[in-house]
Structures are given as structure tokens and as C-alpha cells.
Amino acid sequence: MSKTHVATHINGDSYEFLCNTQQTLLDVLRHELDLKGSKEGCATGDCGACSVMMDDRLVCACLVLGVEADGKKIETVEGLSTGSSLDPLQQKFIDLAALQCGICTPGVLVAAKALLEKNKNPSEEEVRFWLAGNLCRCTGYDKIVRAVLEVAAEARNT
Amino acid sequence: MNDMTQTNLERALKIVGSRPARPDGVDKVTGRALFGADKSLPNMLVGRVLRSPYAHAKIISIDTSKAEELKGVKAIVTSTDFEDFPSEFVPNGEMVVNMKDITRNVMAREKALYVGHTVAAVAATSEDIAEQALALIDVTYEVLPHVLEVEDAEKPGAPLLHDDMITIGIEPAPESASNVAKRVEFGFGDVEKGFSEADLIIEREFTTQQVHQGYIEPHACLASVSEDGQAELWCTTQGPFVVRNFCSKLLGFNAAQIRVTASEIGGGFGGKTVVYLEPLALALSRKSCRPVKMEMNRAEVFTSSGPTSGAKIWVKIGVKNNGQITAGDCVLKYQAGAFQGAPVGPGAMCAFAPYDLKNVRAVGYDIVVNRPKVAAYRAPGGPISEYGVESVIDEIAIKIGMDPIDLRLKNAAKEGTIAPYGPKLGPIGMIETLEAAKSHPHYSAPLGPNQARGVASGFWFNIGGETSSSITINEDGTVGLTLGTPDIGGSRASMAMMASEELGVPMELIKPIIGDTNSLGFNFLTGGSRATFSTGTTVVESTREAIEELKKRAALLWEVSLDQVEWFEGHARLISGDEPKTMSLAQIAKQAGKTGGPIMANCSMNVTGAGPSLGTHIVDVEVDEETGQVSIIRYTAIQDAGKAIHPAYVEGQMQGGAVQGIGWALNEEYIYNEKGELENTGFLDYRIPVCSDVPMIDTVIVEVPNPNHPYGVRGVGETPIIPPLAAISNAVSRATNKRFDELPLSPPKVLAKLMHG
Amino acid sequence: MAQLILTGSLKNLTNGIGEFTIQARNVHQLVGELKRICPPLAPLIESEGFAVAIDGEIYQDILFAPISENSEIHLIPPIGAG
Ligand code: FES
Ligand code: FES
């Protein structure tokens, strides 16, 4: 089977890769490009562990084909921090213990960041519905929601 | 151990009880942390599993010849690659297991016993080739009738899963085989007499469905066996030492040949305490002499790992009009899955354990059915039996017109109470959690229309067990901790905190890691709420030993006797003498080489003295009478932690456990069709709670110290999953004036009850 | 002398007798004693992984847990880990 050449931007860097047409973006990120931060919890779009941004749209990387990334801008958890400074969401998750095992955390962070970019002042309900596609089995969501709300509040106050 | 306890509880704590950042936090929020599926090796093969499509079938033959000819296929294993074992219980670490069953669960032999049961495994150069090879394996089955529910499985004439299974625990032993593996009974007093003294007796049958732990990370491993038989295994597990022991027994390795390294673990909740892929990957790697990586997909996790039991239970409680319980009796029938081992023993032991009863009996049956073999799930066995008992307690409270917390307080177990399983209880916090619930503003808050409030309590034993850890003092005054229990929910932070508290040096100078199986003595797994308690105990002990050594070195340098030196806030201090003298840990460490060599200490012990943890939850629900939909409006979880080392992670355990319980109560269930196939093998249909399903989970940590831990720790992970089942069912029953006795309370079931009663 | 108290289904193994007086200073000796006075009980502790509660404290697989003169001993099944 011949492979397709794909040129894309990931976390601000340009990448080129060859992939089979049926390969998902998640597969490409994890196995071809060795970006293992995006996780696979289901491969069917139900858990959100693979959440990434594609041209400013939040997607499940397991539901996007690798070839669809051609010419697009992809952002993953690996791109959240800049240099040695963490994104405020990353720092708040650590400070408030908003993760236990941490497998859902990359997807939750990417999704939460997407929310805060759209909505600077989300209500608790808006956070809960926005994150409804990101399953977390450890935390019961309480500390995750608090962390997102606190980051939003702090961003508004600075 | 008791005197050291005293000193600690009296001492003002600086670190323990605070909320510092966890040592692995940055790795986890940046995507750097490596989980089970995140590691690769050069020249690696991909392993895939062929699974039975039948719920119950004889395996007549397996022909792998066509698959072997496929280019890129490097190894195929079937049951002939695994040694057989006689049916006997042998110790495996601290578990007692029947290797005859374990080897058959890892790889089906004579029969496939559930849909998804492993029949063969293939390693190939790509996933595609491996999948093609699976399709080329020719298995001839003779399909047999199957049985899925305990009430069908125990009937005479039911299809037998194991034709040599004679029920244990019945005298005289039955003459013929059945699907009932075991009968257990606990209790004392005279329940009949107790019931005769009662003013009110409530008796009810309950049903719960099979549910899965639902960890987000599927099982995954990477095995590499070299030509000389040395094996490396990387896997996501709650117990690398337990994995090593299982795999070495199953495959005939000796323990030193297999080095198991636990990856970061993406949730376990009991489900990652046994082996599924690991022995297959090792066998494939041994055959091909190449590294083999295996991952389950989500459907395989549901069909072929170990969920917990569905059950049928019967509960009868007698009570005086003043609320005094006169007798409690229950019969529990738990699904074991394809092989014996349902958690019905602990379920029976803890059913009535929150209460002080004079006449009590709990009978349990472990029943095999054509479903995957159950594994542990948070407080294994407890949520099911306590759901039944706590529901009946609530019904009694309504009938005698008593507040449900007052009724529980009147009968609460306390220090000195004889537990239903025999021994006298030490100090426990049942009364304290009930009182905290009663005085919580939630308990007296007003309710809206179609809303009601439910409460329930829960008891879990907690365990200790074999544990080993070590501490090293580095030359620059920093400290390394090597731990043997994987960190699922922040335990590295708690361990570093305890070492920091003891040493009196900042936590940032302490680096805790999880060691592999060659770096420490045996460690039982992370589970049963034992890590903070047991590993914490060894960390405190080894840290104290290291402090003794540090004091010795200071004494040498000062040329005084050891008893002249004390340890104070990170320094050795000369007790007497004309002028005060101190030497910091870093100063002593710098000269360690010259004063006798590197400083390290370890502690290995079989930790005892775990203290039971009691919890009480309050929940407000709203029932939509049109659709049957139950919404959780408000939730408060109250629990005795003994001592919360890192309160944020204790709250996290309580919140996460509560929400798992909410899922069990409201939505989660294994749904089988008549062919014995699981119909909901994904998160879309097996619906665990999502963020918008739940409110904030308020928590209250009660601290009744466990006298057997240096800081009073009890362990908190198990208990919080117990109360939600009954608390929610009680709330729904109160909201609708109908007594619900079946889980999950999913909209169709609630609606059916509302319409037909 | 220590008291061994049996409840529930264990009594089936002892013809209904619920209390034994035991001369043992630790679990190891207890197993030896049980083999002598009540053979059907010994395998439970030895191989089926029964735990022993001594004065309310649970010992799982610990042979040298001490038993004192007036200890009260119960046999219970091992408790799992979730
Ligand atoms: S892996 Fe993509 S949504 Fe679960
Ligand atoms: S922290 Fe474990 S799944 Fe979210």
C-alpha cells in the first residue's frame, strides 16, 4: 500500500511524515512522530484522552485521519508550556491536585485551554458541559472543574 | 510501635497535613510521563490476541499452520506453550491463587468460558499482519450451553463450567459438581431469637449488575526476553512484584530472571492486580527472541479483563421501636465469572460491620458463570452487601419514624464492638462520621420539588502486607526514596512528605521513585488502601534508621558518644556541652565517605495493624417522573482517614470513589445478549459518569488516628465507593415513595417502577 | 491459655464446637496445635490463605505474630485489595 506524504505544523514546528490513509492522527502522533503525550483510552471518540487542537478546533485525534492534518496547525499537550514555564492551567492542576493517575490530564488540559480561549468567564455548568467529552475515572471531576474556574478567574484579574 | 506513635501524635507536624505539589506533577501535565503503552524498543513486534466468540465452548482443535506461514509472523502461542498446574491454592505473594485457574484464564485450554476468553496470541512485525494472522488461525469449537446469572447457575441441571467443582464449605461435601464454588458464613448470637424480640422486621431482595473499574488506560505491556532467558517486562500494574511472581510461575522463569518495571499507571482500582497480557507477551518474546508490545483495546478491556461481580442478595433486619437492632441476617450470591473467586467473603464480613449487633449472620456463595473472571474493584465485595443492608436500614428508619442518622448512631459500632467476622474492633470513626454528617449544613438544607435526601454509611477493613522501601542520603544533602508500590493517586508525594517530616528537610530535596523488582524486597501491590499506610510505615522506619546513622556520624566528628546527639529540624545537635553545636544533614552527608561510607537505610516488613475506615455520605437527588432520570443535585462525602498526610489527595480519593459509586448506582452495567455476548463494550454504551453528570463533591475528613501507624493513617481509597449505592437508592426511594431494590437506577428501570410499582 | 473462637461456617469443620483452648505463643505454633486438636482447620490457615485475628488485630500470612496468655483468636478469610 502506498503511503501519503503529509506536511503539517505541530506545536509551532513543521513536520513531514508518510502515513497510510487509514491511520489516525493519534496513531501518527504517537507512533510516527513519537509525541506520546496524547493518550489512547478508547480509539472511538468517547474518552477525550486524545484531545488535540486542529486549526483552533478541539478534536479527538483518534477520529481524525493522519492525512487530514495536511496543511493544518495541530496543537498537543506537548505544546502547552513555553520554555520552562508551564501554562497557568498546568500549574493550577498541580497546585490543586486536579489529577490523580494523570492519564486523562493531557486531554483535559488541551480541552480546558480551548474553552478558556473561547470563553473567558465560563460558569461551572459551562465548564462541566465543555469537559463532558473528557472522561476522568479518578478525580470525580471536582478538582478539575475548580482548577479551570480558578485559572479563568485569575486571568480575568490580571 | 506504640511509643513512637505517641511521640509523633504529640509533636506539631510541619509537612504532614499540608498540600505541597506532587513530585511527578510536571511530568503528568506536560505529557512527559510514560504509561504502559508509551514505551517502545528497537526491533519490536506487535502482539495481538485471538479471543473466543462463544460464551461456553469446548476447544476441539487449534490449527495455527496457515498463520505461521504468513510473512511477518514471528511467533504464535496457544495453551500448549503454557505449563498446566494442579488445582490447589498456592501463595502468590500475599494472595492465595489457584494456578490451574490462572493459567486457564490467561489462555483457554479445554474450554473457552466467556466471550473474549484468550485462545491464542500472535506476534508480528506490524499490527496489520498480526490481525491478518489471527484471522488465519483455525479453531474448531463445540459450542455448549452457557449460563450468565447466579440464579440460573445454581439450579440443578445448569450448564456446568467446571465438571470437577465441588462446593467448599458445606458439610457433608456435596457428591456432585455444581457452579457453586464456595459457601461462607460469618456471625454469632442467635438470629432467630433476635427476630423474635423485634417490633419490626424488614426483609428484602436486591439485585446489582456487573460493573467495571473503568480505568481510562487500557492494559498494556512490553516484554523482552533475550536468548539467554533474561526477561524485562514493562507494564501498567498495581503490583510489579505480583506480576513477576505470576509470570515466573506461569512460564517457568525464576524470579530473578524477570525484571518488572511498573510504568506510570493510568488508573487501576483493583483491575490491575492480576495478569492478562503480560504472560502472553513474555511467551511470544521468548519464542521470537524479540521485544513484543501488547495493548488491549477498550472492547477487550471490557470483555476480557476483570470487572467485579453482579449479585443477588437478601437482607433481613429486626428492630425494636426505639431503633435498637435485634438481629441482622443476609445471604449474598456473587458472580465469580468463569473461575471461582468472587469477593463474597469480604462482602459477607463487612455487610453489617458498621453496626454493633448481638445476633448477626451473613452467608455468601461464590458462583461461577460464563462471564470474565472478576478481579478486585475498590473495597472488593463491600459495596454490594452494604448496599443491601444500608437500604434496609433506611426503610426501617422511615417505618419507625426515626432520623436515618440517629438510627445508625443508636446501633453504631465503636471501639470494643465485636465485628460480625469475629474480632473486637479497635478505635474506629463510625460515630464521628455520623455526627459530622448530622451537623453538616447539607443535612438540614431545604429540598426542592421532586427532590429527596439519602444517607448511607460504609465500612472497609484496609490492609497492610509485605512492604519494602529504602532511603539514601546523597552527598549534597538531598535524599532518594525507592518505593515498591506504584503511585496511582499521589503516593509519591505522601511518602516524600513523611520522610521530610521525619528528617526536617524540605520536601523538594527528597526524590521518591518507584523501584523495579530487582531493586527492593517483595512488595505487595498498591491496593486495599494500603500504600500510604504500609509503604508509609516502612518509609518512616527507614528514615528513622537513616537519622540514627546521621547522628552516629556527627557523634564521630564531635568525638562524643551517640547519646549526646539528638536530631532536630534537619540537624544533628549536641545535647550538652558548653556551647550549642549543630551540624546540618548536608554537612554530615558531605563527609559521609570519610566517616564510614554512604548513608542509606531500608525497611522491609509485613505491615500489620491497618485500621478500618468508616464513611457516611449524604446525597440529594431529583427524580424526573416523566423520564425516570435521576440527577445528583448535591453530594457530601464524610470519612475517617485516621490522619490525612496530603489532604488534597485524600479528598481526591473520596471524590473519585464517590463518583464511581454514583456510576454504579445510576448507569453502569454489563449488558449481555442471549448468546452471551457483551453488548456494551465501549464508553458510549457503558456509561461512566461524565463531568456534566455530577455536582461538586463536598468532603469532610474526620481524623480518628489509627494507633498502629506513626502518623495515625488508616488508608482511604476503598471506603468511598461503598456508601453511594445505598445513599442514592435511598434518596430515590424517598423521592418517589417507592422502595428501589435494583441497580442501576437507570431511567428505564426507574420509570418502570414508577409506573408499575 | 489463649482462646480460639470459631464462628459461622468454620464450626462446620469442628462438629459445631465454637471454642478451643490453645497453648501457642505465635501463629506458627497455633497451626501446629490445630493440626493436633482439629486437623480439618489447619489447611485453612496453611494453604487457603486464612488470616488470623489476635485480640482484634488482623495478621495475614504472619507466622510469628505473637499470641499471649489470654489472647482471643479468630480465623478469618484474607481481605482483598482493590
Ligand atoms: S482515544 Fe480518542 S476519544 Fe478516546
Ligand atoms: S486522573 Fe486518572 S483518569 Fe483522570
Image: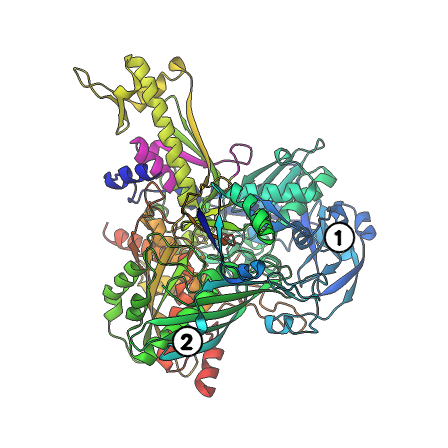
Observer-side mark, 1 or 2, equals: 2
**Is residue A154 on the magenta stretch?**
no
At x 66% / y 33%, what residue is drawn? B230
Question: What's the distance in space between the residues labelled 1 and 2, CA to CA?
Answer: 64 Å
Point out the image quarter for the N terminus of chain B.
Answer: top left
Q: What residue type is labelled 2?
A: Phe
Crowding around mark 2 (Cα neighbors within 10 Å: few <14, some 14 to 19, many 20+) is many
In this rendering, the answer to whether B157 lies above or below B270 is below
Q: What residue type is labelled 1?
A: Ala
Q: Residue at position x 27%, y 42% from top?
A: B9
Residue position for label 2 = B195
| Span shown in magenta | B494-522
Display colour scheme: rainbow
The residue closer to the viewer here, C74 or A31, is C74
Label 2's element? helix
Please give the name of the residue rendered at 53% of the width and 41% of the height, measured from the top-left corner: C28
Q: Give the structural element (helix, strand or loop) at label 1.
A: helix
Q: Residues within 10 Å of mark 1 (few under 14, many from 20)?
A: many
Which numbered circle lies on residue B133? 1
Q: Where is residue B106 in the image (x, y as percent from the top left)?
A: 66, 52
Q: Viewer-proximal residue, B733 or B175?
A: B175
Of the pair B277 and A153, the residue shown nearer to us? B277
